[in-house]
Image (cartoon, rainbow, N blue to C red):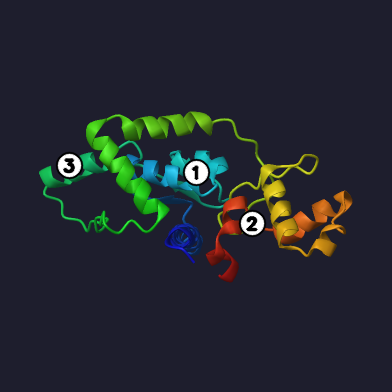
């Protein structure tokens, strides 16, 4: 299992834990502390991991993918630098996450975080541009009854058309099968093959080994 897969797994498990504890405490909303900097890094990482269809959930003020609990981001328009300066002026002490060691870029998340932060130093509008562009891209979303078991995002699978996810999954089945078995994979059995391989998970979660053993 790669560090990239592990980081993605931990992030989704944290979200599920927030919602679970909110239900236990009978809270209808959960406030999280993501800044614009954090959202921009997470956004680009998720696109690289195949979660492009989840943009509206990842960058918006309100994350409504969970039916009973809303996840709200009150600091989504504040950068990490602005937050640090405010804390210093008001003499507020708070635990800060350890800075990434640039010599130890062993995951996609670490590489993108370093890239975005370095680019922001020279072009101050980088982070805000990334987030605003993502909001426009994710504005038109079709609701779907099927949701991923792990991340609770819309599956966006239509029964009447072949999707990129289904094509990739079927290609994997064909490549891993014996030559004699490939002749048996007739078109009418395609839908059943895909449903057996990905019955509950979205594209990204299905490719993450950590979710399959959890």
Residue topped by disc 3: 86
* Residue nearer the viewer, 200 or 69: 200
Are dots 1 and 3 in contact, CB under 8 Å?
A: no
Marks 1 and 3, how far apart at CA: 31 Å
Position in image of residue 66 (x %, y %) = 56, 51
Is residue 61 toward the left or the right of residue 170 in the image? Answer: left
The answer to whether one can see residue 34 in this image is no
Helix, strand or loop for disc 1: helix
Position in image of residue 89 (x %, y %) = 11, 43
| Numbered disc in front, either 1 or 2 | 1
Position in image of residue 149 (x %, y %) = 62, 58
Residue topped by disc 1: 47
Helix, strand or loop for disc 2: loop
Q: Which badge, 2 or 3, comes first in the chain's sequence? A: 3
Position in image of residue 206 (x %, y %) = 61, 58
Determine the image quadrant of residue 124. top left
């Amino acid at each position: 299992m790669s560090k990239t897969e592990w980081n993605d797994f931990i992030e989704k498990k944290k979200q599920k834990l927030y919602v679970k504890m909110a239900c236990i405490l009978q809270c209808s909303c959960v406030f999280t502390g993501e800044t614009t900097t954090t959202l921009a890094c997470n956004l680009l990482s998720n696109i690289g991991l195949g979660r492009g269809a989840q943009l509206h959930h990842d960058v918006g003020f309100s994350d409504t993918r969970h039916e009973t609990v809303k996840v709200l981001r009150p600091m989504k328009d504040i950068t990490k630098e602005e937050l640090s300066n405010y804390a210093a002026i008001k003499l507020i002490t708070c635990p800060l996450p350890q800075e990434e060691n640039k010599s130890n870029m062993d995951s996609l998340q670490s590489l993108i975080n370093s890239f975005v932060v370095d680019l922001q130093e020279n072009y101050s509008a980088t982070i805000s541009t990334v987030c605003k562009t993502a909001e426009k891209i994710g504005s038109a979303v079709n609701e779907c009854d099927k949701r991923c078991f792990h991340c609770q995002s819309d599956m966006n699978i239509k029964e009447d058309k072949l999707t990129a996810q289904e094509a990739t999954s079927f290609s994997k089945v064909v490549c891993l099968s014996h030559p004699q078995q490939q002749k048996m994979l007739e078109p009418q059995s395609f839908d059943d093959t895909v449903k057996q391989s990905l019955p509950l998970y979205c594209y990204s979660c299905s490719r993450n080994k950590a979710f399959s053993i959890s």
